[in-house]
Image (tube, grey):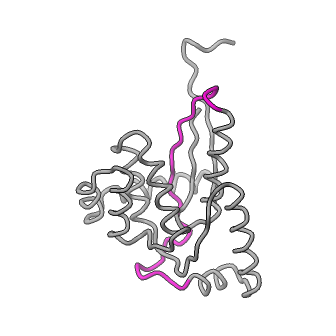
C-alpha cells in the first residue's frame, strides 16, 4: 500500500500525525507492506526568510487570544507526548520551501528511508529544538545527520533545483481538495498477476 503524507514542517499537528501514523503501521506489522511518501504543503508560503514571532503571527492568523494560544499549545504538547513527540519552544515561524526541496530530493535520489529520516529530523529541529528549518546551515546539518550527501544538498540549496517540482506537487494536492494538513492519502497498488477476484 502506498501512503502519501501531505504536510508542512511548520505544522505541529503534522508531527503528531506522523508519529501516530507510524505507531499504527507498527501495529499492522509486515502483514501489509507500506510505502510512505512525503508530499509538500506550505502553511505560510509568503513568509519572509527572517520569519516572524510565532505568538504574534499565530494570534493574528487565527484570531486567537493569549489564553486561546496557550490552551492550544498545551493540547498540542499533550497530544505529542501521547505519541512520543516532545514539543519544545518555537519562538518563530519560518519559511519551509527549501526544506520541501530537500525532502523532494531525498525522496528521488536519497538512500532508502532517507526522506522519512529527514522529515523526522526537520520536525524535531523545529518543533522540538526551535531551530529554523529554512536556514541552509540547519538544513545541511540535518542532511548530514540522516546520511544524505551534504555536498549535493548544498548545491540544491544554492540554486533553485526542485523548486518547480515542489510547487507543482503543492498545486496538485491543493487541487485535489487538501486545504489543511496533515492529510493522509492511501492507495493500493495496481492489481497484477497475484491478484484474485
| Picture quadrant of residue 91 | bottom right
| Picture quadrant of residue 112 | top left
Magenta span: 29-53
Lateral position of residue 63 relative to residue 118, left or right: right
Q: Position of residue 150 (x, y in %)?
A: 27, 56
Q: Position of residue 139 (x, y in %)?
A: 37, 64
| Picture quadrant of residue 50 | bottom left
In the picture, the quarter occupied by the C terminus is top right
Q: Position of residue 100 (x, y in %)?
A: 43, 59
- The image shows residue 139, relative to residue 173, as above or below, that is below
Callout count: 0
Lateral position of residue 79 relative to residue 132, left or right: right
Q: Position of residue 98 (x, y in %)?
A: 39, 64
Which residue is at 39% across, 58% downward?
101
In the picture, the quarter occupied by the N terminus is top right
- The image shows residue 80, relative to residue 115, as above or below, that is below
Which residue is at 34% across, 55% downward?
162
- The image shows residue 117, relative to residue 129, as above or below, that is above
Which residue is at 61% across, 52% downward?
18
Q: Is residue 50 magenta?
A: yes
Q: Is residue 136 magenta?
A: no
Closer-to-camera residue (78/53): 78
Amino acid at each position: 500500500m502506498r501512503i502519501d503524507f501531505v504536510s508542512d514542517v511548520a505544522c505541529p499537528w503534522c508531527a503528531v500525525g506522523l508519529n501516530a501514523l507510524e505507531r499504527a503501521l507498527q501495529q499492522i506489522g509486515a502483514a501489509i507492506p507500506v510505502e510512505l511518501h512525503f508530499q509538500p504543503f506550505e502553511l505560510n508560503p509568503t513568509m519572509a526568510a527572517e520569519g516572524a514571532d510565532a505568538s504574534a503571527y499565530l494570534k493574528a492568523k487565527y484570531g486567537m487570544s493569549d489564553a486561546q494560544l496557550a490552551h492550544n499549545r498545551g493540547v498540542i504538547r499533550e497530544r505529542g507526548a501521547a505519541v512520543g513527540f516532545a514539543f519544545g519552544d518555537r519562538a518563530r515561524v519560518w519559511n519551509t520551501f527549501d526544506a520541501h526541496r530537500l525532502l523532494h530530493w531525498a525522496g528521488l535520489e536519497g538512500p532508502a528511508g532517507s526522506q522519512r529520516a529527514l522529515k523526522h529530523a526537520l520536525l524535531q529541529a523545529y518543533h522540538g529544538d526551535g531551530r529554523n528549518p529554512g536556514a541552509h546551515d540547519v538544513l545541511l546539518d540535518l542532511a548530514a545527520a540522516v546520511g544524505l550527501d551534504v555536498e549535493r544538498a548544498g548545491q540544491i540549496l544554492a540554486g533553485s533545483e526542485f523548486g518547480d517540482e515542489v510547487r507543482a506537487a503543492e498545486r496538485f494536492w491543493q487541487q485535489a481538495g487538501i486545504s489543511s494538513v496533515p492529510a493522509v492519502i492511501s492507495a493500493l497498488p495496481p492489481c497484477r498477476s497475484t491478484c484474485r477476484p
